[in-house]
Image (cartoon, rainbow, N blue to C red):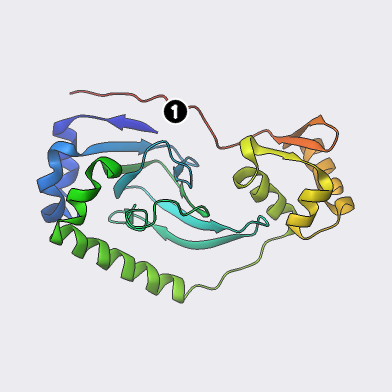
Amino acid sequence: MKRIYDPQAVEKWLRDCRYRTVLEKWEPELALLRYEKGELVTSPLPQERWFQVVVQGNLNIYFIRDDGERYSLSSGNAGYILGDMELFHPNDGSIYTEAAEPLLCLALLMDRNREKLLADSLFLQMVCQSLSEKMAAITAMNAAPCSLSQRVLSYMRYKCPDGVLKGLEREAFHLHCSARQLQRILNQFEQQGKVVKTGKGSYRLVDHPAAIFVPETYTS
C-alpha cells in the first residue's frame, strides 16, 4: 500500500466521487491509498484503521472461519465504502478485503477522527446507507463451500501467525480432517512449492500476504 499526499490529486478524485458533498469538509485530512492487485486492503489486524471510499478499481470481500472455510461476501468498485463497520466494531477478526486489480481509495484516518466522524450527521447518513446495502447483499448471498486443500491454504494464510502451521494433530482438529489427510495435502503443497517444511509437523506458507509496510509520500 502506498500513501499519496497530494492535495491536487485528492481534489481531482474527490470531485468525481459519489460522496463528494459528504467528504469535501474532510478534504484537508484526506489522502489517497494505492493498492496492487492481490494486496490486502483491510484485515483484522491493521497497523492503522482507515475509512476508505474506492475511486478506481475493484475489490473482493470475504469471510474466513476458524477452520479455514472461506466465504465470498461481496465485491465492490467505485463508490464502495470500507471502514463503516469498523467505525463501530474495530476488532472484527474474520473479514478481509483484497484488491482484485490495481485499486485507489480516498482515505481518512479513523482513530484520529472517530469522535468528529460520529458527530457528523451527513457522514453517519452515508454510513447507514452503505451498511444497509451490504446487509441486503449478504442476505441474498449463497455461500459455496471450498475443498479441503483450499481450506488448508486459507487457514495457513489468514489464521496461522506468519503463515506457519505447527502441530498436525491440533491443526487437523481445527480443520475438521484427519492428521493423515492434512499431512497428504501439505506434502502436495511442498512438492508444488507452496509451502516449505521448517521442522517436525511445521510448515510455512511461501506466498504469505503479510508484508512490511513502507509508507511513501508523494507530492505534486
- Name the residue nearer the viewer: 216 or 18: 216
- Above or below residue 161? Residue 58 is below
Residue 110 spot, x, y in % from top left? 28, 45
Q: Residue furthest right?
A: 180
Question: Is 155 situated left or right of 2 in this image?
Answer: right
Residue identified by numbered label 1: 213
Residue 37 spot, x, y in % from top left? 46, 41
- Above or below residue 21? Residue 27 is above
How many numbered marks, from 0 up? 1
Question: Is 43 situated left or right of 178 in this image?
Answer: left
User: Does dot 1 land on a helix, a strand or a loop?
Assistant: loop
The residue under label 1 is which amino acid type? Phe
Residue 31 spot, x, y in % from top left? 24, 36
Q: Residue at x 34, y 52 (%)?
A: 83
Residue 5 spot, x, y in % from top left? 23, 29
- Above or below residue 197? Residue 16 is below
Q: In which quarter of the image is residue 46?
A: top left
Q: Which residue is drawn at 14% across and 61% down?
A: 121
Can residue 55 be seen by looking at this rendering? no
Q: Which residue is drawn at 52% across and 30% down?
A: 211
